[in-house]
Image (spheres, rainbow, N blue to C red):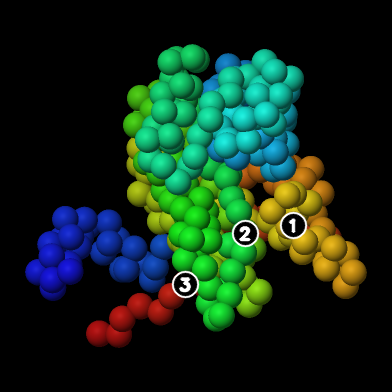
Amino acid sequence: MSAEGTGNEFAGNSGGLLSGLTTGGPQATGTAAAFNTVRSDRLEGKVALITGGGNGIGAGVARRLSAGGARIVLADIDDAAGQSLADELGATYVHCDVTQLEDNEAAVATAVERYGRLDLAFLNAGIASGCGLREDFDIKRYRLAMGVNLDGVVFGAHAAIPALLAGGGGTIVATASMAGIVGIPGDPIYAANKHAVVGLVRSLGQDLEPLGVKVQGLCPSFADTAILGESKAVLEQIGFPILDVTAVVDTFVRLLDSDGTGECWFVIPGRESQPFTFRRAPGPRV
């Protein structure tokens, strides 16, 4: 990319960029414009799209939202699990590979066509990388992990934003991880894409706040889901506590009810969940 090209790109959005820089860097803001943000006591009739909705955290959130009266669209590549849960909840299932922009757009379109609107997008699909950056590096695994964990959030948000705005606003929640806040030597690729999701949440929260769209991040520690794989036995052996999915779902509900936006809520065994407090970056000296 040429220097001229880079300059033009920044110039096209200089107001937003300078807004973040002059305040010492992006931070969670005070209150999202309360047009149509979703709260736990106002779920009746709301429409929620959940990626990675067939299992684990996505399934737990789907059950909680459905119990509150929300209408659910489950998006997953595990068709058997997704359809089974949809049948249980009276929800809609759609096959969705989140690494493909077209699949994300089709999932949003399904929600709008079936229920007339979209109020909440829970961008939750995720996988472990399964490789590192030394002899075990695998370009296919790398691209798949980045595609699911980062592209899936970017594409999902891009697809959902027009539908949310059409309904007067709404809420986007992205599943990141504690790996998006601290370093993870055992899976640096996973840490890289989860750090990217945290940065996206913090930035997009500010960007969409004036439009009435709240953006929140969910950052659990090791939760008892399929993503743990063989790591679960290792964690149990060393006595590291594993989160029950219910604890993550409870935090999801709390972040819905928060007046903030651009927040990243940690979920850690034995601690009360709350937004992580990021230090403000030093500004320029003049």
How far is the residue under mark 1 from the one under mark 3? 36 Å
Question: Considering only order in the chain, which callout, 3 or 2, is on the residue closer to the N terminus?
Answer: 2
Horizontal relation, residue 201 to residue 158: left or right: right
Point out residue 225 in the picture as x, y percentages from the top left corner: 74, 49
Q: Residues within 10 Å of mark 2 (few under 14, many from 20)?
A: many
- Disc 2 + disc 1, Cβ < 8 Å: yes
Q: In the rendered image, which quarter contains the C terminus?
A: bottom left
Q: In the rendered image, which quarter contains the N terminus?
A: bottom left
How far is the residue under mark 2 from the one under mark 1? 9 Å
Name which residue lies at 47% across and 66% down.
Answer: 139
Q: Which structural element holds mark 2? A: loop
Q: Which structural element holds mark 3? A: loop
Specify the amino acid type for callout 1.
Gly
**Occupied quadrant, residue 194:** bottom right
Mark 2 highlights which residue?
A: 128
Q: Which structural element holds mark 1? A: loop
The answer to whether residue 82 shows anywhere in this view is yes
Residue 229 disc label: 1
Specify the amino acid type for callout 2.
Ala
* Tag in front: 1 or 3: 1
Question: Considering only order in the chain, which callout, 3 or 1, is on the residue closer to the N terminus?
Answer: 1
- Disc 1 + disc 3, Cβ < 8 Å: no
State the residue in front, 280 or 199. Answer: 199
Name which residue lies at 73% across and 36% down.
Answer: 60
**Occupied quadrant, residue 88:** top right
How far is the residue under mark 2 from the one under mark 3? 30 Å
State the residue in front, 256 or 73. Answer: 73
Point out residue 220 in the picture as x, y percentages from the top left corner: 68, 56
